[in-house]
Image: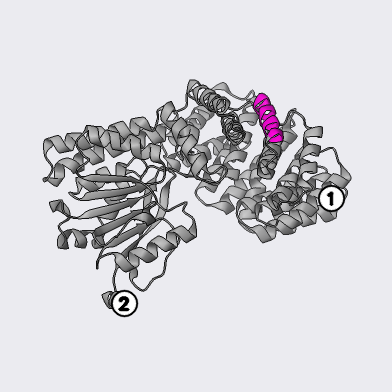
Amino acid sequence: MDVCFAVCSILFFVTVACIFYMSDEDADAADDVEHRFKLEVDFMSQSRLQDAEGSLREVLLARPDHGMAHPKLGILQGSRGELSQAQQSLAAAAVVIRNSRLEGYDAEAGHVLSTLGHLQAQRRDLQGARETYSRDVEYNAEGDLRLAESLKSSQEHVAAEENHRLALRHNPNSVQPHVVLGSFLKNIGRSAEAEHCYHNALTLDPTMADVHLNLALLQDARRDAKAEDSFIAAIWRGPQNSHAHRELGRHYFRQGKLLEAERSFRTSIRLEESHLGERDVSVLLAEVLFEQSKIPEALSVFTQAVNKWVFAGHSPISFMMTLEFGESGYAAAVRSERDAFNATCFSMGHLSKAMTAGLMTTLDAMRALETNPDFIRLWFMESRDMFDFHQSDKTYGAIWFNSWQVVARTAPFQALLATTKLRAGTATILVAGSGLGEQCLFAVALGARCVAYELLCGMVSAGRALMDQHSLSGWISSHCSNVEEAESFGHIQIAWLNDKFWSPSVRERLLERLARELPLDALVLSFGDHFSHEALTEVESLTVSASWGSAQSATLYRRTNELWRQMEL
């Protein structure tokens, strides 16, 4: 059941429950009907769909005019993909509600008809959907707009655009069709046409702050000088819009107008009502203060923002990263990782109890450090100095141990284990973009030594201190430098590149070197786009988890074609 279908369903049930009444028929029969109707709720909560459908049909057999049973049956059928049956049930529901003649019946029928229209659109009955959407409203292109929205949610972009434009033809002097079509075109990447729609809408009604803002964002994206005027127009007509002030601040920041940017960001923070919005603008304000060499004030702004974020019940790590599955999902991932890593360390057989304990304690300390506000501040400061403007949220990502398990189970990795001295402590694994160095702990658990490269020196220093504390420095060599500065890769058996956000030129240069210098049969794991080279053969396409996403595509390459290498030499 798609999102639109679910939303329409919820809207219907919340409102119809408030207006429907029971008839004054025989009390015992009515009680039996309502008992059967309540059974459906219990069956649905237990995912017993057939029993739920049976209860609804018994209710309708006893009371064909039951206002709740028809739509519930339609929605159940729709969730199973039985669109034709669902359409019949919802059409019956609309008739029952209309015939009830209760106050508010038009609104209730509208909710049912909206769901029915969406089903018709899914079945490609576009004319029927248009008629359904328009049935209970004075015809003013509303049916075409609703139909276009249904088609858009189903990725039917061509048909959606056709219906948006049909809405315009029906009422060219109405503002809404221009705005909706503009937003649709913007969302599918046709910015120039979207701008034209917004201009048309503003010609009809120049007071719409949101339309001025949408136009400004499109103009700013292509660095049009008119963007500033559009931002100012949006703020003039909607002075309490925090988003407009923030985006104008970004515009000024990119132009190097730091004082103007600072003023806009401060206004945005004052108006912002959400914790998420305040976090984002606070980071921007701290960055613009850093650019003005107002270091103490920048640190104060950032620290206050982190403290407020934590006080509101959020984890510090989510201040700098978007957690795909939220705070609880992140905590669950850490617990799952610890259990899996602990079990693996004990199962390997070649690690002493002291070494296993040292690895586990170090991993715990690293994950705890990622939620420390002081560490978050260090991370932010280094990221903003090292990377491009507003890229600090993409410069660090934890790699979970289960990702290493996925790679370790592949046939190429198992073959490498069988043919190298990986478990004898003489093989070396390279990690580029190593963060605190947790991946080197995973490498050591396999019996390998690890060499790590990371550009954020504060991270390297913090991770190195933890490794030294637990006697792991003999196994792990951490470098605060670009991996391209490594003297040689001839001793590396596995190269793990956390290159999701690397620039293409840096990534290609490194892969070229690895292709020339790695020993035969060595493996390379990359999160970047596919790389083609005579000496690197793609052997596996994988999906692994990282803190920047649970389903990240990765490619495993094997160093091959020794004859090519000899020719190069």
Q: Is residue 28 above or below residue 428?
A: above
* Residue 86 left/right relative to 369: right
Q: Quarter-wise, where is residue 272 in the image?
A: top right
Q: Quarter-wise, where is residue 480 in the image?
A: top left
Q: CA distance from mark 2 to mark 1?
A: 61 Å
Residue identifier under label 2 = 564
Magenta stretch holds residue 520:
no
In the picture, the quarter occupied by the C terminus is: bottom left
* Residue 344 left/right relative to 141: left
Residue drawn at (44%, 28%) of the image? 315
Residue identifier under label 1 = 200
Residue drawn at (40%, 30%) of the image? 371
Point out residue 96 in the picture as x, y percentages from the top left corner: 67, 38
Disc 2 versus disc 1: nearer the observer:
2
Q: Is residue 225 above or below residue 417?
A: above
Q: Which residues are magenta?
A: 259-272
Q: Quarter-wise, where is residue 556 in the image?
A: bottom left
Residue drawn at (30%, 66%) of the image? 517
Residue type (three-letter) at the residue carrying disc 1 = Asn
Q: Earlier in the sequence, mark 2 or mark 1?
A: 1
Residue type (three-letter) at the residue carrying disc 2 = Trp
